[in-house]
Every structure is written in structure tokens, then in C-alpha cells.
Amino acid sequence: MDESRDTSAGKERAEGSAFLRVGTTAAAACLIAGSIVGLGAMGALATPGSAYSDVTASGAVSTADEQPKAALPSYTEADLAAFATSAYADDALNLAVVWETTPEDARGKAGAKILAGVPLPFGADEATTMSYTPDQQRTALQYSFDTYPQLLALATAWGSGDMIEAKAEMGAVLLAHQSLPALPATVTNDQALRAFQLAGFDDSDAVKLAGLWQTDTYSAIVRAGGEILAGKDLPL
């Protein structure tokens, strides 16, 4: 195994760590925000059950308990229905990566354009033959899977030695309206080894884990790969 970390591996490792730790980060942000609001304006403490008040420059008190209204979607049920019955009904993912939005928003946006007689970025039979960038291909894959461990498991089954490349290749398959291999039901040692590498870990990490777990490096890599695929953090 190459002891050097290449750019793509480092990027995937950072991406995977961010994906797995996003819940913790969000929780911490909420706690911090709650502490700030609890202090009130100019150090005044809000009493339990009272609306949070702010003191303006003129000395007037303004109540800030009204929450901003959620933005309404820019499309209607009629737009979604128009898309669902159109020749583009299977092209939501393709439109999403072109418009840099979600597949759901792409359905609504496309439906609105169809009702208004506005052309879409490609013809009704051209979605699968369009030329997509590697970034668009990777985005298509990410829209189709909920978690990083799922993506990693699929990449190990795909057989590529590079996660960035594997994601683009698999995204291209989806944009061509073809099916990807099923997620592995069980994890083999070879898949665990590949997952460890695709996640951006290397020999130095294996040595550290072997020391922590009191085992040999091969066994440490197999165990680590299995834990990564299960969505667990490694003690590194």
C-alpha cells in the first residue's frame, strides 16, 4: 500500500468525516445559538416563558418571538403533475444536475416551464446522451444515496481504486438511466481493505490502529474497513 496520501484520497477522507460528524456539529451549533439567545440583548436575561426582547438604538423594545416564515416552493402541485405526465418524467435527476438543484425542485421547475411553453435544457429523448461533467456525475450519485457509508460500500463493490473516480463513473451510469450493482449484503475482507483505502486511510493509520487494538496491521485494516462501512468513526 502506498504510504503517501494522494489528493483525491484526502478529499474523500475529509468528506466522509464531515458526513459522519454532521449531526454532532449541528447539535453543538444549536447549543451555542441557544446560549447566545438566552443572554438577551445587552446582557439582559430573558425570563422563562417570556418572549425574547431586543433593545433598539432609540430605547424602544422590539419583540423577536415571531419566527420567519418558511419560503414557499416556487412551483405548484400543477407543475409537478405536468412534469409527471410529460415525456421528461424520468429525467428529474438529469435536470437536477444541470440546474444545480434537487430532483424534487427540478420536477417542479420543469413542470412550470412545460406549462409555460418554455424549452428545457435538452430534448425529451436526449437526457441519456447529454454530456455531463464529472462534478455533475458525482452529484447525481450523491442524490441517489442517503449516507457516505452507502456510497463507500457501493464503491468497494464497483472495484475502482479511487473514490472520486468511482463516484463519477457510477453517477454516469445513473444519468444514463441504468442500474447500479446492489449494495453488498455482507462485507468481505477484500471489500473492507478497499473501503479503508477509498476512505483515504493509509499504512501509518493501520499501524496506529493495530497498536490501539493490539493486533496485526492486516487485521486492523479489515476491522477498520468494516467499521467505516457501518458508519462508525475510527479512533484516529
Image (cartoon, rainbow, N blue to C red):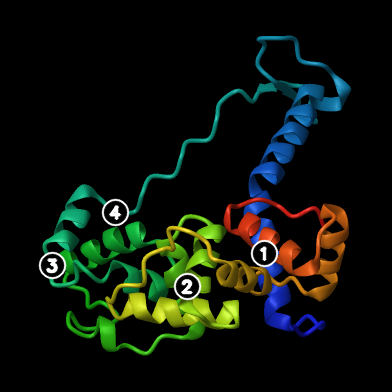
Image vertical order of residue 150 relative to residue 170, above or below: above
Asked if disc 4 and disc 1 are in contact, CB closer than 8 Å, the reply is no
Q: Residue 157 carries which label?
A: 2
Q: Nearer the viewer, mark 1 or mark 2?
A: 1
Instruction: Please give left or right for residue 154 compared with residue 56 in the image.
Output: left
Distance (Cα) linking label 3 and label 1? 49 Å
Q: 217 or 29, which is in the foreground? A: 217
Secondary structure of residue under mark 2: helix
Q: Which of marks 2 and 3 is nearer the N terminus?
A: 3
- Answer with the quarter of the image where residue 94 lies: bottom left
Along the line of sight, the residue nearer the viewer: 79 or 43: 79
Identify the element where label 4 is drawn.
loop
Mark 4 vs 3: CB contact within 8 A: no
Alpha carbon separation for disc pair 4 and 2? 39 Å
Q: How far apart in space, not on screen, are marks 4 and 1 (Cα)?
A: 48 Å
State the image quarter where residue 56 is shown: top right
Disc on the earlier residue, 4 or 1: 4
Q: Earlier in the sequence, mark 4 or mark 2?
A: 4
Tell me the number on the disc at residue 86. 3
Q: Residue type at mark 1?
A: Val
At x 60% / y 23%, what residue is drawn? 65
In what element is the residue under mark 3?
loop
The span from disc 1 to disc 2 (Cα, nearest Å) is 15 Å
Q: According to the image, label 1 marks what residue?
A: 222
Name the spot of residue 219 as percent of width and height, x first.
72, 64
